[in-house]
Image (tube, grey):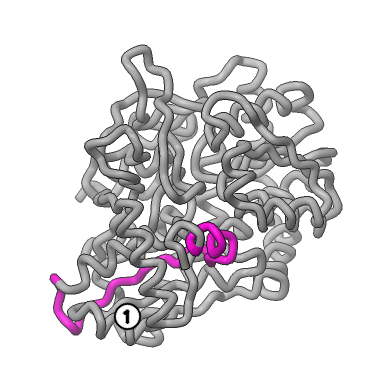
Amino acid sequence: MDRTFLDMPDSQGYFGEYGGQLIPPELKAVMDDINTAYDQVRQTAAFQDELAELYAHYVGRPSPIFHAKRLSQRQGGARIVLKREDLNHTGAHKINHCLGEALLAKYMGKTKVLAETGAGQHGVALASACALVGIDCEIHMGEIDIAKEHPNVTKMKILGCKLVPVSRGTRTLKDAVDSAFEEYLKDPVNFFYAIGSVVGPHPFPKMVRDFQSIVGREARAQCLAQHGRLPDMVVACVGGGSNAMGIFTEFLPDDAVQLVGVEPAGRGLDTPDHAATMARGTKGAIHGFACYTLQDAQGEPLPVYSIASGLDYPGVGPQHCHLKDIGRVQYESITDDECLDAFMVLSRTEGIIPALESAHAVAYAMKVAKTMAPEQTILVNLSGRGDKDADFVAQHLGL
């Protein structure tokens, strides 16, 4: 296989034909400033040391890998191993890039950090990181998600961030992005937009991936140390795609390791109620970058749906799009019902309550494990914990 995909993006922020900066010239100048600052700051010992110290003593990294023995026995076939990002401070992988973004904003002398959030994990992580580095934080969140993710909403308020409810359009993630971006454009010189995934205009897909890639670096070394070999398959859920890029990146050169991204099939791919961008999307653009999108004939984003608020995004990270096209990563989908089943099974076989987002990845691993041999291993990125979803699931299932 051609190895050029390992050195992406190019200087214009493209991963093959995806990514770039599809934005007005005045905004391009601001993004280029962020890119320059990022490339300079990340090389400095001061930034690296501060981030490494925070990962270790604030987040609690490295997060462990855990062999889910009872789950593996129940399914039969391959060993299922979990990368426990749910154990991070703030409960998910999002803190990995939020600390990086908040530190970068501080180094750049910005006065306020702005962002969108879906499930609220990015919002809580960013509010925590901003409280830690002492910078103002404003989070935009759709009204539907606010109602569904109440615990995270409360946390954001306690952490001192300004929470802006978004009542337009679908009142979910896509509209929260639009709303936050409009606020950002009022003063892009003093504000910093902390995108919550490997999406948006260059340099964000690169920057968020770089901060998240610690997940895969740890997991690869942990698999070798504990099992003496690499996993046969690595599975992660994909909305925008940050946790998946985080765990995939270190394994990309390992041809023998199969990489699988799991999208939300919602109420079924044959209904409009899903957010399976790779399975059903077409080439387009959204939020300042080129990618596969779920769009109508006019190129407008379709209203998308998932039981997991962190996955219902009508676009997907540009690097994922390229990795799909070249065949390095395969993309599958899991329905709401399969996700809920995995949520309950993992909780009751291992005593680990996963986020509904991460439960999509667990569900795929449960499905595929039985087709594999007992000596094979599936590494699942358990990207977040399910505290935020527990009440919603209990109500939904009538527990």
- The correct choice, above or below, for 63 with respect to 317 in the image is below
Give the residue displayed 72% in from the left and 70% down from the top.
Answer: 58
In this rendered view, identify the residue nearer to me: 199 or 87: 87
Q: Quadrant of residue 344?
A: bottom left
- The correct choice, above or below, for 332 with respect to 395 in the image is above
* Residue 321 shows in the view: no
Position of 263 compared to 54: left or right? left
Task: Determine the secondary structure under disc 1.
Answer: helix
Q: Quadrant of residue 300?
A: top left
Position of 306 compared to 209: left or right? left
- The correct choice, above or below, for 321 with respect to 152 in the image is above
In this rendered view, identify the residue nearer to me: 104 or 173: 173
Give the residue displayed 66% in from the left and 49% down from the top.
Answer: 123
Residue 23 picture location, percent across and down: 55, 20
Give the residue displayed 22% in from the left and 66% down from the top.
Answer: 367
Q: Which residue is mark 1?
A: 71
Q: Amino acid at mark 1?
A: Leu
* Image: magenta residue range: 371-394
* Residue 346 shows in the view: yes
